[in-house]
Image: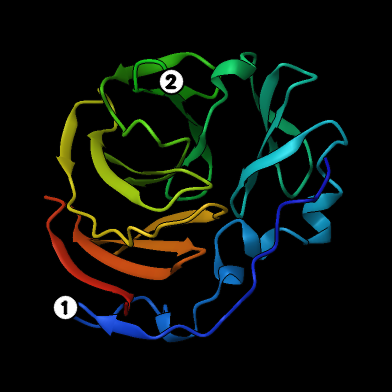
Amino acid sequence: MRWSLPLLLLSSVAWADVSVTSSGGFDVTKCTMADGPLRREEVSLDVKKLVPQQAWLRQLSRRHLLLASREWDKSMVLDRASGKEVMQHPRYEKSPTALVENADGSLLGLLELAQGDHRLQLLDVTGKARWATRPAFDQLSDSASTLVAGDLLIVATYHRIATGSQLRAYDLKTGTPIWKADVLQLNVAHSKYWNDVSVEQLGQSVVLRGFEAGGCYVQTFDIATGKRFSAILPKR
């Protein structure tokens, strides 16, 4: 893999509290692109040594790496501690977009975004589809971050080089849509761009963090209904 993702110039940003202050120890006044969920690990030596030359890193967590390769025409998941392959998906053209992990960090499977019909598909660790639902994400999305919270699979979808994100919840067993959140967007005009999104649970809230070239944000939502509790966005 070539580690040549474009680096962004870091700058100070003014912030406006849209409703209440952020939670979970995320200080938006000090947020930079280096705080993004992929960017902060990008130069880590323990990650680099696990990525074969002909592959690139799509996503990582504390336990796993999701790799993809045109040469292999497949995607695979590696255990970060051992470097061993724990899952493989043989279709590169429908490359799985996100790791799906249980609360203890063990791998539940992979989430796949099928671009043709906007179908969202959950694959188990054998690569078998557990369920599929459509339409499940906006046309421009090519990436996702996930959170397993009880009986829910919460999914944030976004595009790596475009502004914005979406947040939805599905029944973990069936894929039935449960709610769609009203996410406030930066709506930044741009040519070259970089975007990453993380999602996590804090009590009965879902915390959505966006790391964009145009600025960072944090928004919280009710885990049961998707109702937005708070949002902190860059001041324009």
Residue type, label 1: Ser
- The residue indicated by pointer 1 is 19
Q: Residue at x 74, y 22 (%)?
A: 70
Other-residue count near label 1 (Cα within 10 Å), few / some / many at <14 / 14–19 / ≥20: few
- The residue indicated by pointer 2 is 114
What secondary structure is found at the residue carrying circle 1?
Answer: loop
Task: Locate the N terminus and report the quarter of the image it occupies.
Answer: top right
| Sequence-earlier tag: 1 or 2 | 1
Q: Residue at x 40, y 35 (%)?
A: 140
Q: Please, is residue 87 above or below residue 183 in the view?
A: above
Q: Position of residue 185 (x, y in %)?
A: 29, 58
Residue type, label 2: Ala
Describe residue 154's horizontal placement relative to residue 113 as left or right.
Answer: left
Q: Position of residue 61 (x, y in %)?
A: 59, 51
Q: Can you see residue 27? A: no
Q: Can you see residue 141? A: yes
Q: Please, is residue 43 above or below residue 77 in the view?
A: below
Other-residue count near label 2 (Cα within 10 Å), few / some / many at <14 / 14–19 / ≥20: many
Describe residue 86's horizontal placement relative to residue 154 as left or right.
Answer: right
What secondary structure is found at the residue carrying circle 2?
Answer: strand
Task: Locate the C terminus and report the quarter of the image it occupies.
Answer: bottom left
What distance separates the C-alpha of mark 1 from that of mark 2? 35 Å
Q: Which of the two residues, 233 or 222, is positioned nearer the viewer here?
A: 233
Q: Residue at x 68, y 19 (%)?
A: 74
